[in-house]
Image (cartoon, rainbow, N blue to C red):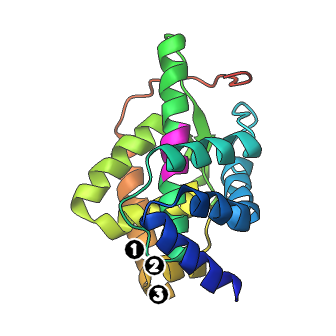
Amino acid sequence: MSTGAQITSLLGRWNAGDEEAFKSLVSLVYAELRRLAHNRLGQENSNLTVNTTALVHETYMRLAEHPPHEVRDRNHFFAVAATVMRRVLVDRARERLAAKRDGGIRLELQPDMMPASDRDVDLLALDEALDALSQLDERQSQIVELRFFAGLSIEDTAEVLATSSATVKRDWMTARAWLYDVMSRQPKRATKVDTDGA
């Protein structure tokens, strides 16, 4: 049985409530989950020191505790994992902000995410802007989530969303411009902090 067929079979069993299937699924895709987490964390500035293993394990725990209603296939699974990774990072940022009055977590976006002069971005502000964008255009919000939080390429994002690379490129450009406009009007509310031990 091919890896894709194994994943589909395990997803079907997991959707039916088989917890062992989920453990087998994670074992099968663990390396790819680590790659996604590594891509995401590799784009962040040196002040955010959440490691790849911790992000993957937290993602695993959240998926195990609160499985999605239905995961259709491998691509859908990785889209769900990207969303969970986003929630993990945002929750960590909120915890740090609560613990330190002027805390927060700032991330450095990919070079093509925003103009070079303003790539250092408040994660909570980005999360709020993405929530607002999802109300206007769900696909654009998903594209940003997959590209930024999961580190997927244009081609991989198109595959996950079952659309063309040209559509992803167009929506990516539009979403970037919209996010930059919204976020450039938000007051700066957080400073860089070290998250070691958080």
Q: Position of residue 155 (x, y in %)?
A: 58, 82
When asked about the image quadrant of residue 141, the answer is bottom left
Q: Please identify the quarter of the rendering in which residue 74 is found.
A: bottom right
Q: Does dot 3 land on a helix, a strand or a loop?
A: helix
Q: Is residue 154 visible?
A: no
Q: Is residue 183 visible?
A: yes
Q: Relative to 96, is 5 above or below?
A: below
Q: CA distance from mark 2 to mark 3?
A: 5 Å
Residue linked to disc 3: 166
Q: CA distance from mark 2 to mark 1?
A: 5 Å
Looking at the rendering, the stretch of residues picked out in magenta corresponds to 84-89
Asked which quadrant contains residue 108, the reply is top right
Q: Is residue 60 above or below residue 20?
A: above
Q: Which residue is mark 2?
A: 168
Task: Inspect the image, locate mark 3, and give the three-letter code of the amino acid beneath it.
Answer: Ala
Q: Quadrant of the N terminus?
A: bottom right
What secondary structure characterizes most of the magenta part? Answer: helix
Horizontally, is 39 left or right of 112 in the view? right
Q: Amino acid at mark 1?
A: Asp
Label pair 2/1, CB-CB below 8 angstroms: yes
Do tag 2 and tag 3 residues touch (Cβ < 8 Å)? yes
Q: Secondary structure at mark 1?
A: helix
Q: Residue at x 60, y 58 (%)?
A: 20
Secondary structure beneath label 2: helix
Task: Provide residue 50's location: percent of width, then percent of height.
Answer: 70, 36
Closer to the camera, 131 or 175? 131
Q: Residues within 10 Å of mark 1 (few under 14, many from 20)?
A: some
Q: Which residue is mark 1?
A: 171
Give, as a three-letter code, the residue at label 2: Val
Q: From the top left corner, tell me how far across and down residue 100 is, in percent.
A: 54, 11
Asked whether 32 falls inside the magenta stretch, the response is: no
